Amino acid sequence: MTREGIFLTSQEALRAVRLDFRGYGAQPMLFCEILRMVFGPDRLYQREPGKEGLWIAEGLQRMRWLEGSELIEYMCTILNEAELPPDRLAALCRLVFQAPCRPEDHSETGRAGIRVQTDMEAFACRQCGQCCRSLAYHDGITAQDVAKLKECGRLDILEWVGQTQTAEGQTVYRIWITPGSNQFAVLCPFLKSGPSPERWLCSIHDVKPTICRNYPVSRKHALMTGCPGFDTI
Ligand code: SF4
Ligand code: SF4
């Protein structure tokens, strides 16, 4: 990731949109904007005050109520099928990621895609510890993270890493498991109080898992997960 943002192929951009929908739950206001932008008058939709769903109709069909995962999967399906041209896909990404996005062909491969400005230059960690205390990162550690910890001889950290096998025989790692048990620790054991009561520090900053290092990945990610790192002071 650079100041110029990240390049996503068209397929990767659509996958990121689906991940956003599935990760953050149904977003009826956003979905209305998308339906208007992508489908114009071909799709009717209506919100109901105080409810997290939408009435939707295609063409002459009767309106039907969708909410929760049904609404999310509906949006994923219709966007997959829409085969948006690059300028419309960029407009979709702007709405979803709340960041500047423009169509671009990859400089080396020539593949069509979208450049997303992540706006990370405006981010400053406030050391509030909110992410460490409340986000679900249990499946977040990668095999590369584990390999790095082994290389650094960090057995003190590795003893908090659990390990299971998938049905396909793949090794999956879990954090943080209280040593000698198969229970997740209530709080990350490496979160330490900082120089003042409202500040928190990561005691394994240099080798912390990628999921921790990369958080948050964008302004929207911060906004949706309660990180104040983009707030103006
Ligand atoms: S929630 Fe955001 S500001 Fe707070 S510690 Fe995490 S990254 Fe930093
Ligand atoms: S390893 Fe560090 S950054 Fe990750 S959750 Fe623990 S204290 Fe936070």
Image (cartoon, rainbow, N blue to C red):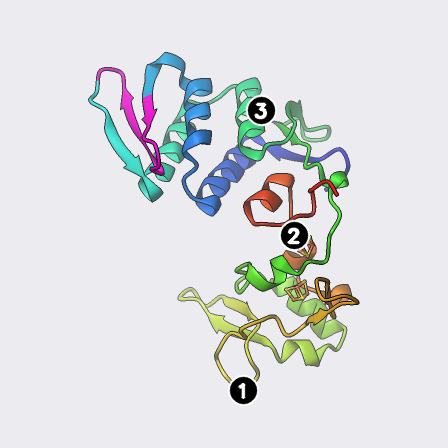
The residue depicted at 66 percent of the width and 63 percent of the height is 209
Which residue type does callout 3 highlight? Answer: Ala
The location of residue 68, given as percent across then percent down, is: 34, 43
Q: State the separation of the CA atoms marked 1 and 3.
A: 49 Å
Q: Secondary structure at mark 2?
A: loop
Mark 1 or mark 2, which has the lower sequence index? 1
Q: At label 2, which amino acid type do we have?
A: Tyr
Residue located beneath label 1 in the image: 180
Residue to which mark 3 is pinned: 90
The residue that disc 2 covers is 215
Which class describes the residues within 10 Å of circle 3: few (<14), some (14-19), or many (20+)? many
In the picture, the quarter occupied by the N terminus is: top right
Asked if residue 219 is positioned above or below residue 154 in the image, the reply reads: above
Mark 2 Cβ and ligand 1 under 8 Å apart: yes
The quadrant of the rendered image in which ligand 2 is seen is bottom right
Q: Is residue 144 above or below residue 60?
A: below
- Dot 1: element: loop
Residue 36 in which image quadrant: top left
Give the mark toward the camera: 1 or 2: 2
